[in-house]
DNA sequence: CGGCCCTTTGACGGACGTCAAATAGCGTGG
DNA sequence: CCACGCTATTTGACGTCCGTCAAAGGGCCG
Protein backbone atom coordinates (compact mmCIF):
# COMPACT_ATOMS: atom_id res chain seq x y z
CA UNK A 1 0.00 0.00 0.00
CA UNK A 2 1.23 3.48 -0.85
CA UNK A 3 1.26 5.68 2.19
CA UNK A 4 3.03 8.70 0.74
CA UNK A 5 -0.19 10.67 0.83
CA UNK A 6 0.56 11.71 4.40
CA UNK A 7 4.02 12.92 3.45
CA UNK A 8 4.39 16.70 3.25
CA UNK A 9 6.46 16.26 0.10
CA UNK A 10 3.68 14.36 -1.55
CA UNK A 11 3.13 16.69 -4.46
CA UNK A 12 6.78 16.96 -5.36
CA UNK A 13 8.37 14.74 -7.90
CA UNK A 14 6.77 11.46 -8.64
CA UNK A 15 5.15 10.53 -5.36
CA UNK A 16 1.79 12.00 -6.22
CA UNK A 17 1.74 10.76 -9.79
CA UNK A 18 2.67 7.24 -8.79
CA UNK A 19 0.13 7.10 -6.02
CA UNK A 20 -2.59 8.29 -8.33
CA UNK A 21 -1.68 5.76 -10.95
CA UNK A 22 -1.69 3.07 -8.34
CA UNK A 23 -5.10 4.03 -7.08
CA UNK A 24 -6.52 4.03 -10.57
CA UNK A 25 -5.11 0.61 -11.22
CA UNK A 26 -6.57 -0.85 -8.07
CA UNK A 27 -10.08 -0.53 -9.43
CA UNK A 28 -9.23 -3.11 -12.01
CA UNK A 29 -8.95 -6.86 -11.53
CA UNK A 30 -5.23 -7.14 -12.15
CA UNK A 31 -4.15 -5.04 -9.21
CA UNK A 32 -0.63 -3.73 -9.56
CA UNK A 33 1.54 -4.34 -6.54
CA UNK A 34 3.59 -1.47 -5.19
CA UNK A 35 5.28 -2.40 -1.99
CA UNK A 36 7.51 -0.05 -0.11
CA UNK A 37 9.65 -0.14 2.99
CA UNK A 38 10.80 2.72 5.17
CA UNK A 39 14.34 3.09 6.48
CA UNK A 40 16.19 5.34 8.88
CA UNK A 41 19.85 6.17 8.30
CA UNK A 42 21.98 8.02 10.87
CA UNK A 43 23.99 11.06 9.79
CA UNK A 44 27.23 10.42 7.97
CA UNK A 45 26.27 6.86 6.99
CA UNK A 46 26.12 5.77 3.35
CA UNK A 47 22.65 5.19 1.88
CA UNK A 48 24.02 3.44 -1.16
CA UNK A 49 27.44 2.37 -2.32
CA UNK A 50 29.22 2.97 -5.62
CA UNK A 51 29.49 -0.70 -6.62
CA UNK A 52 25.98 -1.58 -5.60
CA UNK A 53 23.34 -1.99 -8.31
CA UNK A 54 20.22 -2.02 -6.23
CA UNK A 55 16.87 -3.40 -7.28
CA UNK A 56 15.21 -0.60 -5.38
CA UNK A 57 14.21 2.96 -6.12
CA UNK A 58 14.77 5.23 -3.15
CA UNK A 59 13.00 8.45 -2.22
CA UNK A 60 14.16 10.74 0.57
CA UNK A 61 11.40 11.41 3.10
CA UNK A 62 13.27 13.57 5.61
CA UNK A 63 16.77 14.92 6.13
CA UNK A 64 19.58 15.95 3.79
CA UNK A 65 21.82 13.66 1.75
CA UNK A 66 24.58 14.08 -0.83
CA UNK A 67 25.06 12.17 -4.07
CA UNK A 68 28.70 12.00 -5.12
CA UNK A 69 31.36 10.28 -7.18
CA UNK A 70 34.60 9.19 -5.51
CA UNK A 71 38.04 9.26 -7.12
CA UNK A 72 41.28 7.58 -6.18
CA UNK A 73 43.26 9.67 -3.72
CA UNK A 74 40.25 10.44 -1.55
CA UNK A 75 39.01 13.15 -3.92
CA UNK A 76 35.27 13.32 -4.36
CA UNK A 77 32.77 15.42 -6.25
CA UNK A 78 29.30 15.98 -4.86
CA UNK A 79 26.85 16.14 -7.76
CA UNK A 80 23.73 17.11 -5.87
CA UNK A 81 22.24 17.55 -2.46
CA UNK A 82 19.06 15.62 -1.81
CA UNK A 83 16.19 16.91 0.29
CA UNK A 84 12.80 15.45 1.21
CA UNK A 85 10.81 14.45 -1.87
CA UNK A 86 13.89 13.88 -4.01
CA UNK A 87 14.45 10.64 -5.81
CA UNK A 88 17.91 9.22 -5.39
CA UNK A 89 18.62 10.05 -9.03
CA UNK A 90 15.64 10.10 -11.32
CA UNK A 91 17.94 9.57 -14.27
CA UNK A 92 18.66 6.07 -13.09
CA UNK A 93 15.17 5.11 -12.22
CA UNK A 94 14.79 2.58 -14.99
CA UNK A 95 18.22 1.06 -14.81
CA UNK A 96 20.09 1.00 -11.53
CA UNK A 97 22.65 3.71 -11.12
CA UNK A 98 26.26 2.85 -10.91
CA UNK A 99 29.43 4.34 -9.51
CA UNK A 100 27.96 6.88 -7.16
CA UNK A 101 27.65 7.04 -3.41
CA UNK A 102 24.75 8.57 -1.56
CA UNK A 103 25.51 9.66 1.97
CA UNK A 104 23.29 10.96 4.73
CA UNK A 105 24.28 14.42 5.98
CA UNK A 106 21.64 14.64 8.69
CA UNK A 107 19.73 11.60 9.88
CA UNK A 108 17.64 10.53 6.90
CA UNK A 109 14.44 8.58 6.51
CA UNK A 110 13.73 7.18 3.10
CA UNK A 111 11.33 4.87 1.35
CA UNK A 112 12.28 2.13 -1.07
CA UNK A 113 10.19 0.73 -3.91
CA UNK A 114 10.87 -2.32 -6.03
CA UNK A 115 12.29 -1.10 -9.30
CA UNK A 116 10.31 -3.62 -11.35
CA UNK A 117 6.97 -2.61 -9.82
CA UNK A 118 7.80 1.06 -10.15
CA UNK A 119 8.65 0.61 -13.81
CA UNK A 120 5.45 -1.24 -14.61
CA UNK A 121 3.33 1.51 -13.18
CA UNK A 122 5.40 4.14 -14.92
CA UNK A 123 4.89 2.74 -18.37
CA UNK A 124 1.19 2.07 -17.84
CA UNK A 125 0.25 5.63 -16.98
CA UNK A 126 1.34 8.34 -19.39
CA UNK A 127 0.90 11.23 -16.92
CA UNK A 128 3.48 9.61 -14.66
CA UNK A 129 5.83 9.36 -17.57
CA UNK A 130 5.36 13.02 -18.43
CA UNK A 131 6.15 13.95 -14.87
CA UNK A 132 9.20 11.74 -14.98
CA UNK A 133 10.54 13.32 -18.13
CA UNK A 134 10.06 16.73 -16.57
CA UNK A 135 12.06 15.68 -13.53
CA UNK A 136 14.69 14.21 -15.82
CA UNK A 137 15.09 17.48 -17.66
CA UNK A 138 15.43 19.46 -14.46
CA UNK A 139 18.13 17.11 -13.25
CA UNK A 140 19.98 17.27 -16.51
CA UNK A 141 19.83 21.06 -16.60
CA UNK A 142 21.27 21.12 -13.09
CA UNK A 143 24.06 18.74 -14.05
CA UNK A 144 25.00 21.04 -16.91
CA UNK A 145 24.87 24.10 -14.67
CA UNK A 146 27.23 22.37 -12.28
CA UNK A 147 29.71 21.72 -15.07
CA UNK A 148 29.63 25.39 -16.05
CA UNK A 149 30.19 26.46 -12.46
CA UNK A 150 33.13 24.12 -11.99
CA UNK A 151 34.69 24.87 -15.34
CA UNK A 152 34.26 28.60 -15.60
CA UNK A 153 33.52 30.29 -12.31
CA UNK A 154 35.71 31.58 -9.47
CA UNK A 155 35.48 30.24 -5.93
CA UNK A 156 33.26 32.97 -4.51
CA UNK A 157 30.84 32.68 -7.43
CA UNK A 158 30.63 28.92 -6.98
CA UNK A 159 29.89 29.18 -3.29
CA UNK A 160 27.40 32.01 -3.70
CA UNK A 161 25.57 29.99 -6.34
CA UNK A 162 25.54 26.87 -4.20
CA UNK A 163 23.97 28.80 -1.36
CA UNK A 164 21.31 30.31 -3.61
CA UNK A 165 20.55 26.92 -5.13
CA UNK A 166 20.14 25.32 -1.72
CA UNK A 167 17.94 28.20 -0.57
CA UNK A 168 15.72 27.70 -3.61
CA UNK A 169 15.57 23.98 -3.03
CA UNK A 170 14.60 24.48 0.61
CA UNK A 171 12.03 27.11 -0.22
CA UNK A 172 10.27 24.82 -2.69
CA UNK A 173 9.90 22.33 0.14
CA UNK A 174 8.69 24.93 2.64
CA UNK A 175 11.81 24.27 4.67
CA UNK A 176 12.66 27.97 4.57
CA UNK A 177 10.61 31.09 4.95
CA UNK A 178 12.25 34.44 5.28
CA UNK A 179 16.01 34.77 4.88
CA UNK A 180 17.03 32.06 7.37
CA UNK A 181 17.23 28.31 6.84
CA UNK A 182 18.59 25.16 8.43
CA UNK A 183 22.05 24.52 7.07
CA UNK A 184 23.52 21.17 8.10
CA UNK A 185 26.43 21.16 5.61
CA UNK A 186 30.00 20.96 6.88
CA UNK A 187 32.52 23.03 4.97
CA UNK A 188 33.88 19.75 3.68
CA UNK A 189 30.56 19.21 1.89
CA UNK A 190 30.71 22.67 0.34
CA UNK A 191 34.28 22.01 -0.75
CA UNK A 192 33.36 18.70 -2.37
CA UNK A 193 30.40 20.28 -4.14
CA UNK A 194 32.35 23.27 -5.49
CA UNK A 195 35.62 21.56 -6.37
CA UNK A 196 37.55 23.51 -3.73
CA UNK A 197 39.39 22.64 -0.51
CA UNK A 198 37.84 23.07 2.93
CA UNK A 199 40.52 25.61 3.81
CA UNK A 200 39.69 27.83 0.87
CA UNK A 201 35.97 27.42 1.50
CA UNK A 202 36.51 28.71 5.00
CA UNK A 203 38.29 31.79 3.65
CA UNK A 204 35.65 32.57 1.03
CA UNK A 205 32.78 32.09 3.47
CA UNK A 206 34.64 34.28 5.91
CA UNK A 207 34.70 37.02 3.27
CA UNK A 208 31.03 36.60 2.36
CA UNK A 209 30.17 36.98 6.05
CA UNK A 210 32.55 39.89 6.54
CA UNK A 211 30.98 41.67 3.57
CA UNK A 212 27.55 41.21 5.12
CA UNK A 213 26.11 38.96 2.40
CA UNK A 214 25.38 35.95 4.56
CA UNK A 215 25.63 34.80 8.13
CA UNK A 216 26.24 31.28 9.32
CA UNK A 217 25.93 30.34 12.95
CA UNK A 218 25.27 27.05 14.56
CA UNK A 219 23.66 24.97 11.90
CA UNK A 220 21.66 27.73 10.26
CA UNK A 221 22.30 30.19 7.45
CA UNK A 222 20.86 33.64 6.85
CA UNK A 223 20.98 35.46 3.55
CA UNK A 224 21.54 38.99 4.79
CA UNK A 225 22.00 40.84 1.50
CA UNK A 226 20.28 38.80 -1.16
CA UNK A 227 20.65 41.34 -3.96
CA UNK A 228 24.40 41.51 -3.53
CA UNK A 229 24.71 37.74 -3.16
CA UNK A 230 22.87 37.30 -6.44
CA UNK A 231 25.15 39.81 -8.09
CA UNK A 232 28.25 37.96 -6.94
CA UNK A 233 26.70 34.71 -8.15
CA UNK A 234 25.62 36.19 -11.49
CA UNK A 235 22.21 34.79 -10.72
CA UNK A 236 19.23 36.13 -12.61
CA UNK B 1 9.04 10.06 -45.36
CA UNK B 2 11.86 8.82 -43.21
CA UNK B 3 15.02 8.40 -45.23
CA UNK B 4 17.44 7.73 -42.41
CA UNK B 5 17.73 4.12 -43.45
CA UNK B 6 20.45 5.06 -45.92
CA UNK B 7 22.42 6.90 -43.24
CA UNK B 8 25.48 5.03 -41.98
CA UNK B 9 24.59 6.10 -38.45
CA UNK B 10 21.18 4.53 -38.75
CA UNK B 11 21.47 2.05 -35.93
CA UNK B 12 22.80 4.57 -33.44
CA UNK B 13 20.56 6.41 -31.10
CA UNK B 14 16.95 6.76 -32.02
CA UNK B 15 17.03 6.81 -35.79
CA UNK B 16 16.44 3.12 -36.20
CA UNK B 17 13.82 2.87 -33.49
CA UNK B 18 11.85 5.80 -34.80
CA UNK B 19 11.94 4.57 -38.35
CA UNK B 20 10.74 1.16 -37.32
CA UNK B 21 7.91 2.63 -35.29
CA UNK B 22 6.94 4.78 -38.19
CA UNK B 23 6.87 1.87 -40.57
CA UNK B 24 4.70 -0.14 -38.23
CA UNK B 25 2.27 2.71 -37.90
CA UNK B 26 1.91 3.18 -41.63
CA UNK B 27 0.13 -0.09 -41.94
CA UNK B 28 -2.76 1.37 -40.02
CA UNK B 29 -5.39 3.79 -41.27
CA UNK B 30 -4.34 6.74 -39.14
CA UNK B 31 -0.91 7.14 -40.62
CA UNK B 32 1.44 9.09 -38.39
CA UNK B 33 3.21 11.91 -40.16
CA UNK B 34 6.94 12.28 -39.68
CA UNK B 35 8.32 14.96 -41.88
CA UNK B 36 11.96 15.90 -41.90
CA UNK B 37 14.16 18.43 -43.59
CA UNK B 38 17.88 18.32 -44.21
CA UNK B 39 20.21 21.25 -43.65
CA UNK B 40 23.84 22.10 -44.29
CA UNK B 41 25.73 24.40 -41.94
CA UNK B 42 29.22 25.71 -42.68
CA UNK B 43 31.98 25.37 -40.10
CA UNK B 44 31.92 27.84 -37.25
CA UNK B 45 28.28 28.77 -37.73
CA UNK B 46 25.69 28.32 -34.97
CA UNK B 47 23.18 25.52 -35.41
CA UNK B 48 20.96 26.78 -32.65
CA UNK B 49 20.94 29.79 -30.38
CA UNK B 50 20.67 30.03 -26.59
CA UNK B 51 17.40 31.99 -26.56
CA UNK B 52 15.75 29.96 -29.25
CA UNK B 53 13.12 27.42 -28.23
CA UNK B 54 12.78 25.48 -31.40
CA UNK B 55 9.84 23.30 -32.38
CA UNK B 56 12.26 20.93 -34.05
CA UNK B 57 14.35 18.00 -32.96
CA UNK B 58 17.74 17.95 -34.68
CA UNK B 59 19.99 15.00 -35.46
CA UNK B 60 23.55 15.38 -36.74
CA UNK B 61 24.11 13.47 -39.98
CA UNK B 62 27.71 14.42 -40.73
CA UNK B 63 30.44 16.59 -39.25
CA UNK B 64 31.34 17.65 -35.71
CA UNK B 65 29.49 20.15 -33.52
CA UNK B 66 29.79 21.46 -29.96
CA UNK B 67 27.00 22.06 -27.46
CA UNK B 68 27.85 24.78 -24.98
CA UNK B 69 26.64 27.31 -22.44
CA UNK B 70 27.84 30.92 -22.69
CA UNK B 71 28.54 33.18 -19.74
CA UNK B 72 28.94 36.93 -19.52
CA UNK B 73 32.51 38.00 -20.18
CA UNK B 74 32.89 35.74 -23.19
CA UNK B 75 33.49 32.66 -21.05
CA UNK B 76 31.90 29.49 -22.31
CA UNK B 77 31.72 25.84 -21.29
CA UNK B 78 31.39 23.13 -23.90
CA UNK B 79 29.21 20.37 -22.50
CA UNK B 80 29.58 17.83 -25.27
CA UNK B 81 30.87 17.28 -28.75
CA UNK B 82 28.33 15.97 -31.23
CA UNK B 83 29.16 13.54 -34.00
CA UNK B 84 27.03 11.88 -36.70
CA UNK B 85 24.04 10.07 -35.22
CA UNK B 86 23.87 12.27 -32.14
CA UNK B 87 20.70 14.04 -31.17
CA UNK B 88 21.17 17.68 -30.32
CA UNK B 89 20.46 16.86 -26.68
CA UNK B 90 18.27 13.85 -26.05
CA UNK B 91 17.44 15.23 -22.63
CA UNK B 92 15.48 18.04 -24.19
CA UNK B 93 13.71 16.00 -26.78
CA UNK B 94 10.28 16.38 -25.22
CA UNK B 95 10.55 19.98 -24.21
CA UNK B 96 12.74 22.34 -26.18
CA UNK B 97 16.13 22.98 -24.68
CA UNK B 98 16.99 26.39 -23.46
CA UNK B 99 20.08 28.44 -22.86
CA UNK B 100 22.57 26.50 -24.87
CA UNK B 101 24.28 27.11 -28.18
CA UNK B 102 25.16 24.43 -30.67
CA UNK B 103 27.93 25.34 -33.06
CA UNK B 104 29.31 23.58 -36.10
CA UNK B 105 33.02 22.76 -35.84
CA UNK B 106 33.35 21.26 -39.29
CA UNK B 107 30.70 21.72 -41.96
CA UNK B 108 27.65 19.90 -40.62
CA UNK B 109 24.64 18.33 -42.23
CA UNK B 110 21.68 17.65 -39.99
CA UNK B 111 18.09 16.57 -40.18
CA UNK B 112 15.20 18.22 -38.35
CA UNK B 113 11.95 16.61 -37.24
CA UNK B 114 8.84 18.28 -35.88
CA UNK B 115 8.92 17.89 -32.14
CA UNK B 116 5.20 17.19 -31.92
CA UNK B 117 5.31 14.36 -34.47
CA UNK B 118 8.43 12.92 -32.89
CA UNK B 119 6.76 12.91 -29.50
CA UNK B 120 3.64 11.19 -30.71
CA UNK B 121 5.60 8.35 -32.22
CA UNK B 122 7.75 8.11 -29.13
CA UNK B 123 4.87 7.59 -26.77
CA UNK B 124 3.08 5.16 -29.04
CA UNK B 125 5.90 2.65 -29.29
CA UNK B 126 7.40 1.42 -26.04
CA UNK B 127 10.62 0.09 -27.61
CA UNK B 128 11.42 3.60 -28.79
CA UNK B 129 10.86 4.86 -25.31
CA UNK B 130 13.19 2.24 -23.86
CA UNK B 131 15.85 3.28 -26.30
CA UNK B 132 15.29 6.89 -25.40
CA UNK B 133 15.67 6.27 -21.70
CA UNK B 134 18.89 4.41 -22.38
CA UNK B 135 20.24 7.36 -24.35
CA UNK B 136 19.11 9.66 -21.57
CA UNK B 137 21.04 7.71 -19.01
CA UNK B 138 24.19 7.73 -21.06
CA UNK B 139 23.98 11.46 -21.49
CA UNK B 140 23.37 12.00 -17.82
CA UNK B 141 26.29 9.79 -16.85
CA UNK B 142 28.51 11.80 -19.19
CA UNK B 143 27.30 15.07 -17.71
CA UNK B 144 28.22 13.82 -14.25
CA UNK B 145 31.62 12.61 -15.45
CA UNK B 146 32.27 16.05 -16.87
CA UNK B 147 31.49 17.67 -13.53
CA UNK B 148 33.94 15.34 -11.79
CA UNK B 149 36.65 16.12 -14.33
CA UNK B 150 36.18 19.86 -14.01
CA UNK B 151 35.89 19.83 -10.25
CA UNK B 152 38.56 17.38 -9.26
CA UNK B 153 41.11 16.70 -11.99
CA UNK B 154 44.31 18.46 -13.08
CA UNK B 155 44.76 19.94 -16.56
CA UNK B 156 46.67 17.02 -18.08
CA UNK B 157 44.13 14.52 -16.74
CA UNK B 158 41.26 16.52 -18.19
CA UNK B 159 42.84 16.74 -21.61
CA UNK B 160 43.89 13.10 -21.67
CA UNK B 161 40.36 12.09 -20.75
CA UNK B 162 38.83 14.32 -23.38
CA UNK B 163 41.02 12.74 -26.05
CA UNK B 164 40.12 9.23 -24.93
CA UNK B 165 36.43 10.10 -24.84
CA UNK B 166 36.53 11.52 -28.34
CA UNK B 167 38.46 8.49 -29.60
CA UNK B 168 35.78 6.22 -28.12
CA UNK B 169 33.03 8.29 -29.64
CA UNK B 170 34.68 8.19 -33.07
CA UNK B 171 35.36 4.48 -32.84
CA UNK B 172 31.71 3.71 -32.11
CA UNK B 173 30.85 5.52 -35.34
CA UNK B 174 33.56 3.77 -37.35
CA UNK B 175 35.23 7.12 -37.85
CA UNK B 176 38.45 5.76 -36.42
CA UNK B 177 40.29 2.50 -36.88
CA UNK B 178 43.78 2.05 -35.59
CA UNK B 179 45.39 4.74 -33.44
CA UNK B 180 44.76 7.69 -35.81
CA UNK B 181 41.61 9.77 -36.22
CA UNK B 182 40.38 13.00 -37.77
CA UNK B 183 40.64 15.75 -35.20
CA UNK B 184 39.05 19.02 -36.29
CA UNK B 185 39.08 20.68 -32.84
CA UNK B 186 40.93 23.95 -32.34
CA UNK B 187 42.74 24.32 -29.05
CA UNK B 188 40.09 26.88 -28.16
CA UNK B 189 37.52 24.07 -28.26
CA UNK B 190 39.63 21.91 -26.00
CA UNK B 191 40.05 24.83 -23.63
CA UNK B 192 36.31 25.49 -23.50
CA UNK B 193 35.58 21.82 -22.91
CA UNK B 194 38.13 21.38 -20.12
CA UNK B 195 37.70 24.70 -18.32
CA UNK B 196 41.23 25.85 -19.21
CA UNK B 197 42.73 28.61 -21.35
CA UNK B 198 43.98 28.03 -24.89
CA UNK B 199 47.49 28.98 -23.80
CA UNK B 200 47.59 26.37 -21.08
CA UNK B 201 46.06 23.78 -23.39
CA UNK B 202 48.89 24.41 -25.82
CA UNK B 203 51.45 23.78 -23.07
CA UNK B 204 49.83 20.59 -21.83
CA UNK B 205 49.39 19.20 -25.33
CA UNK B 206 52.99 20.10 -26.03
CA UNK B 207 53.99 17.96 -23.05
CA UNK B 208 51.77 15.05 -24.04
CA UNK B 209 53.39 15.11 -27.47
CA UNK B 210 56.89 15.54 -26.09
CA UNK B 211 56.32 12.54 -23.80
CA UNK B 212 55.27 10.48 -26.81
CA UNK B 213 51.68 9.85 -25.69
CA UNK B 214 49.96 11.47 -28.65
CA UNK B 215 50.77 13.23 -31.88
CA UNK B 216 48.73 15.94 -33.52
CA UNK B 217 49.50 17.14 -37.01
CA UNK B 218 47.34 18.83 -39.53
CA UNK B 219 43.83 18.01 -38.49
CA UNK B 220 44.47 14.49 -37.29
CA UNK B 221 45.43 12.94 -33.97
CA UNK B 222 47.33 9.74 -33.24
CA UNK B 223 47.33 7.99 -29.89
CA UNK B 224 50.93 6.81 -29.79
CA UNK B 225 51.09 5.31 -26.31
CA UNK B 226 47.57 4.38 -25.33
CA UNK B 227 48.49 2.56 -22.12
CA UNK B 228 50.32 5.56 -20.74
CA UNK B 229 47.61 7.97 -21.89
CA UNK B 230 45.04 5.91 -20.03
CA UNK B 231 47.22 5.91 -16.93
CA UNK B 232 47.51 9.69 -16.99
CA UNK B 233 43.75 9.93 -17.50
CA UNK B 234 42.97 7.41 -14.73
CA UNK B 235 40.82 5.66 -17.30
CA UNK B 236 39.82 2.06 -16.67
C1' DC C 1 38.25 18.85 32.33
C1' DG C 2 39.74 16.53 28.15
C1' DG C 3 39.18 14.69 23.62
C1' DC C 4 37.36 15.02 19.10
C1' DC C 5 35.86 17.46 15.13
C1' DC C 6 35.34 21.40 12.78
C1' DT C 7 36.76 25.93 11.60
C1' DT C 8 40.00 29.61 11.29
C1' DT C 9 44.41 31.71 10.32
C1' DG C 10 48.92 32.41 8.29
C1' DA C 11 53.01 31.30 5.55
C1' DC C 12 54.34 29.34 1.53
C1' DG C 13 54.19 26.92 -3.02
C1' DG C 14 52.38 25.55 -7.41
C1' DA C 15 49.19 25.18 -11.10
C1' DC C 16 47.07 27.77 -14.10
C1' DG C 17 45.82 32.52 -16.03
C1' DT C 18 47.27 36.84 -18.37
C1' DC C 19 49.76 39.48 -21.47
C1' DA C 20 52.58 40.07 -25.28
C1' DA C 21 55.42 38.86 -28.94
C1' DA C 22 57.12 35.48 -32.13
C1' DT C 23 56.14 31.70 -35.22
C1' DA C 24 53.61 28.70 -38.10
C1' DG C 25 49.56 27.45 -41.29
C1' DC C 26 46.67 28.39 -44.79
C1' DG C 27 43.76 30.35 -48.15
C1' DT C 28 43.64 34.34 -51.46
C1' DG C 29 45.09 37.09 -54.95
C1' DG C 30 48.63 38.78 -57.75
C1' DC D 1 55.38 30.74 -57.37
C1' DC D 2 55.51 34.28 -54.05
C1' DA D 3 53.48 38.03 -51.18
C1' DC D 4 49.77 38.97 -47.93
C1' DG D 5 46.71 38.76 -44.28
C1' DC D 6 44.31 36.22 -41.18
C1' DT D 7 43.93 32.93 -37.64
C1' DA D 8 45.92 29.32 -34.77
C1' DT D 9 49.72 27.83 -32.11
C1' DT D 10 53.85 28.41 -29.46
C1' DT D 11 56.82 30.50 -26.10
C1' DG D 12 58.34 33.19 -22.13
C1' DA D 13 57.82 36.37 -18.25
C1' DC D 14 55.05 37.38 -14.68
C1' DG D 15 50.83 37.45 -11.62
C1' DT D 16 47.10 35.40 -8.96
C1' DC D 17 44.02 32.22 -7.25
C1' DC D 18 43.75 28.43 -4.91
C1' DG D 19 46.10 24.27 -2.65
C1' DT D 20 49.13 22.53 1.05
C1' DC D 21 50.85 22.34 5.49
C1' DA D 22 50.81 23.34 10.14
C1' DA D 23 49.25 25.34 14.22
C1' DA D 24 45.90 27.59 16.88
C1' DG D 25 41.22 28.35 18.40
C1' DG D 26 36.04 26.78 19.07
C1' DG D 27 32.04 23.79 20.02
C1' DC D 28 30.16 19.76 21.70
C1' DC D 29 29.82 15.78 24.50
C1' DG D 30 31.28 12.47 27.58
Image (cartoon, coloured by chain):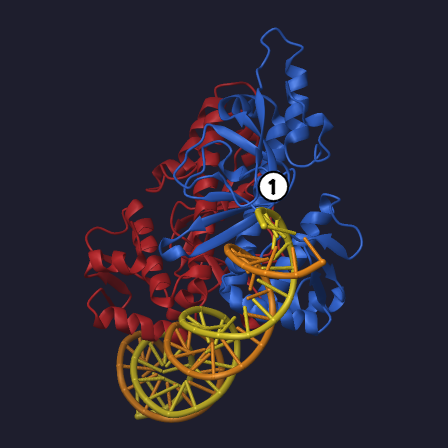
Chain colours: A red, B blue, C yellow, D orange
- Give the residue drawn at x 46%, y 30%: A130
Image location of residue A119, percent across then percent down: 56, 34
**Residue B187, picture quadrant:** bottom right
Q: Nearer the viewer, residue A205 or A45?
A: A205
Chain letter of disc 1 in the image? B
- Asked if residue A184 shows in the view, the reply is no
Image location of residue B225, percent across then percent down: 76, 67
Question: As drawn, which residue projects farthest toward the top?
Answer: B29
Give the residue pinned by disc 1.
Answer: B107
- Give the residue drawn at x 53%, y 69%: B200
Eyeballing the image, is D4 above or below B15?
below
- Asked if residue A63 shows in the view, the reply is yes
**Residue B27, picture quadrant:** top right
Helix, strand or loop at label 1? It is: loop
Image location of residue A61, percent across then percent down: 40, 48
Q: Nearer the viewer, residue B155 or A43?
A: B155
**Residue B3, picture quadrant:** top right
Amino acid sequence: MVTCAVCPMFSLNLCAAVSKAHEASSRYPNLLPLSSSTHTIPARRKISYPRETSDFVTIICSGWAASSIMLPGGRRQILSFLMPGDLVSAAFLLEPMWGRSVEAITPVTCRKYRRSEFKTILFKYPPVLEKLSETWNEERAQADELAVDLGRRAANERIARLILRLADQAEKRSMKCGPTMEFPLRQQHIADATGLTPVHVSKVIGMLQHDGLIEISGRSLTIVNEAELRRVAEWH
